[in-house]
Image (cartoon, rainbow, N blue to C red):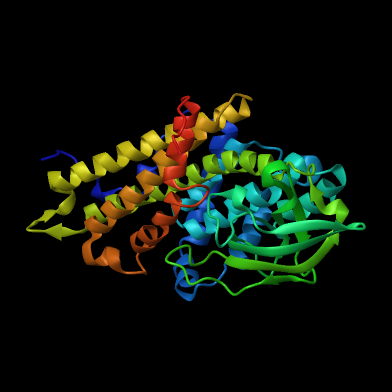
Amino acid sequence: MPDDDRGGNDRADVTPVMSDLSPEHEQLRESVERFAQREVAPVIGGFYEREEFPYEIVAKMGEMGLFGLPIPERYGGMGGDYLALCVALEELARVDSSVAITLEAGVGLGAMPIYRFGTEEQKQRWLPDLCSATILGAFGLTEPGGGSDAGATRTTARLDGDEWVINGTKAFITNSGTAITGIVTVTAVTRRLDGGRPQISAIIVPAGTPGFTVSKTYSKVGWLASDTRELSFDDCRVPAANLLGEVGRGYAQFLQTLDEGRVALAALSVGLAQGCIDESLRYLGEREAFGHKIGEYQVLQFKLADMEARTHTARLAYRDAAQRMLNGRPFKKHAAIAKLVASDAAMLNAREATQIFGGYGFMNESPVGRFYRDAKILEIGEGTSEVQRMLIARELGLRSAL
């Protein structure tokens, strides 16, 4: 049996060592950790139970500058980098994934495509409000019949004079129907090339545009305090100037957006995995069985050891991918590895934490219960685990027989 009892430790004592972070990143991490503990943890269970979007929390995150972390100051951002966003996502997800995915989608899918590919006029118009969370942005890629196969896009956009006319449907779009949603960037087929191949472009559609309809929220398994909707476009007209990037470059732009998004989602997954460790360590020090704290039983110690090893490995993977991206090095394979490893760690840790908590872990009011419900989507969103394996194999030079 161990000589020391970890069970009495508070959360600060189990915070993972972040010695590889710069002083600026560490300061940010500590700030977001305090915010998550003081502002999110006490109230998020109620939002989750009511399936209510946490506008007050999002507003406070906007005031902190979290939605502008990787955006230059001249556009209203904080002038940080993508690793800063990942650090913030990890700390938020240690407490709640709905809040974390709202930030991840708002920045990675809402603001970053405009920053990466937008005209100067588009950047000046939209980024300041996106960075302050005065408005939220969304990215409409997935369609009801086409999951990861973006090449099967059926939404169309045709030029009619100086306007794009958009028709089609998008599914599972995060941040697309809140009261503060300002824009949705959608991918659409703008023409058919030789052999019928689609030419895909990206177009910015402001909320409230005639012909743009937002459906009611989905009934979801997890992320219950996050906004997810189906969108439909029926002769929806927007100015030709709302084209994002170049005509026909929408598919390539979306691939870059997803590569970056996978790093961010890996960080979020690490946060959930770490949250499972935090909660389990606390419980192991409180719960007694057969005259002993359950943390004294080796079978449970081994569970925690495996959870810690998975989380540590996943953290190294997303940090490596983020650093490669910041250094301008190829990172597609490393983003896929990070997303695959981290989402797997989140799912396994959530399962183990629920097992450790027993019946209490099956209750929705328990953070562990929420972690378990939130974990599965991490193996699906931003490309399924199967897609990540496919990408890794391709980067190794292997080709499919299909």
Pick whichever, 230 or 305, lies toward us. Answer: 230
The total number of labels drawn is 0
Q: Residue 332: horizontal and vertical position, in percent?
A: 55, 32
Pick whichever, 387 or 298, lies toward us. Answer: 387
Residue 324, can we see it?
A: yes
Q: Residue 249: horizontal and vertical position, in percent?
A: 73, 41
Pick whichever, 291 or 147, lies toward us. Answer: 147
In the picture, the quarter occupied by the N terminus is top left
Q: In this view, does 139 lie to the left or right of 295?
A: right
Q: In this view, does 273 lie to the left or right of 7?
A: right
Q: In this view, does 171 lie to the left or right of 18?
A: right
Q: Residue 70: horizontal and vertical position, in percent?
A: 67, 40
Quadrant of the image occupied by residue 183: bottom right
Residue furthest out toward the left: 290
User: Residue at horizontal 34%, vertical 59%?
Assistant: 368
User: Residue at horizontal 48%, vertical 62%?
Assistant: 223
Q: Residue 345: horizontal and vertical position, in percent?
A: 36, 44
